[in-house]
Amino acid sequence: MFHGWTIRLVSIKNAEQGQGLVEYALIVLFVSVAAVAALTLFGTTVSDLFDAVVGGFP
């Protein structure tokens, strides 16, 4: 009787670990998409700003 419960608890625990892994993978995916979009939109502006700052040093 207890053996069946043990197997169910272990399978629930494994399913929750898999769910957490998928959630972290989705977070990484969304952050990387946002980073690529930000660099695409603002990349040249930021590059020009850095060039201006570096050009200001003697």
Image (cartoon, rainbow, N blue to C red):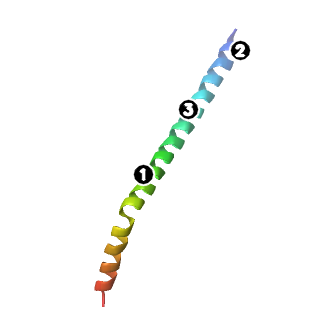
Label 2: state its secondary structure: helix
Distance Cα–Cα, label 1 vs label 2: 47 Å
- In the rendered image, the quadrant that contains the N terminus is top right
Residue at coordinates 34% horizontally, 82% vertically from top-left?
54
Residue at coordinates 60% horizontally, 28% vertically from top-left?
15
Q: Indicate which disc, 2 or 3, sits on the residue closer to the N terminus.
A: 2
Graded by Cα atoms within 10 Å as few (under 14), some (14 to 19) or many (20 or more), the crowding at tag 3 reads few
* Mark 2, residue position: 3
Distance Cα–Cα, label 3 vs label 1: 23 Å
Residue type, numbered disc 1: Ala
Percent coordinates x, y for residue 18 in the rendering = 60, 33
Percent coordinates x, y for residue 19 in the rendering = 55, 32
User: Against 6, is 17 above or below?
Assistant: below
Label 1: state its secondary structure: helix
Residue at coordinates 42% horizontally, 55% vertically from top-left?
37
* Mark 1, residue position: 34
Percent coordinates x, y for residue 40 in the rendering = 42, 60
State how many labels appear.
Answer: 3
User: Against 35, is 23 above or below?
Assistant: above
Graded by Cα atoms within 10 Å as few (under 14), some (14 to 19) or many (20 or more), the crowding at tag 1 reads few
Where on the picture, by quarter, is residue 38? bottom left
* Mark 3, residue position: 19
Residue reaching furthest to the top: 1
Where on the picture, by quarter, is residue 36? bottom left
Distance Cα–Cα, label 2 vs label 3: 24 Å
- In the rendered image, the quadrant that contains the C terminus is bottom left
Where on the picture, by quarter, is residue 5? top right
Of the pair 28 and 44, the residue shown nearer to us: 44
